[in-house]
Amino acid sequence: QVQLVESGGGLVQTGGSLRLSCVVRGIVFSLDTMAWFRQAPGKQRELVASITSGGSTNYADSVKGRFTISRDNVKDTVYLQMNKVKPEDTAVYYCIPWGLVGLGIWGQGTQVTVSS
């Protein structure tokens, strides 16, 4: 059974920083591409960033240059460093192994609220 436990969200002012963490259980973490998605109120869930098992990264245009995804294959944890946050970054953030996208298997997420 896959377990996805996100943490690190909170209230932050515009221009501030947050670091999200996600511990993953139930898969061979080191072999999987990992992704962060987010869902704002009234909007569809969208891809924020992804990182392959080899460390190659990909970002949504809206966060390029501000967010950094990384992973620790010893701790089975994926991170999202969020810098220079904007009010439009307000959302619930979810991590997920790429192979589970589309299967409806999501964690509880972590709420990020950016005040203007």
Image (cartoon, rainbow, N blue to C red):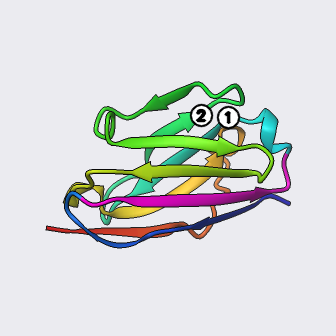
Q: Position of residue 113 (x, y in %)?
A: 31, 70
- At 33% across and 51% down in the image, what residue appears? 83
- Check residue 51 in the rendering and tell me which mark sits there, or answer none: 2
Query: Which of the labelled discs sits on residue 7, or is there none?
Result: none
Note whether residue 98 is visible.
yes
- Residue 69 is situated, as x and y percent measured from the top left of the image, at 52, 42
Quarter of the image for residue 34 reads top right
Give how far across and how far down residue 7 sits, in percent: 56, 68
Gap in Å between the C-alphas at discs 1 and 2? 6 Å
Image: 64 above or below 115: above
Provide the residue designation for mark 1: 33
The quadrant in which the C terminus is found is bottom left
* Mark 2 residue crowding within 10 angstroms, few (<14) / some (14–19) / many (20+): many
Picture coordinates of residue 3 (x, y %)? 76, 63
At 32% across and 40% down in the image, what residue appears?
63
Amino acid marked by disc 1 = Thr
Query: Quadrant of the image for the N terminus?
Result: bottom right
**Residue 101 visible in the current orientation:** no
Element on which disc 2 rests? strand
Q: Secondary structure at mark 1?
A: loop
Provide the major secondary structure of the magenta segment.
Answer: strand
Mark 1 touches mark 2? (CB < 8 Å): yes
Other-residue count near label 1 (Cα within 10 Å), few / some / many at <14 / 14–19 / ≥20: some
The magenta region covers 16-27
User: Disc 2 marks which amino acid?
Assistant: Ile
Q: Earlier in the sequence, mark 1 or mark 2?
A: 1
Q: Quadrant of residue 115?
A: bottom left
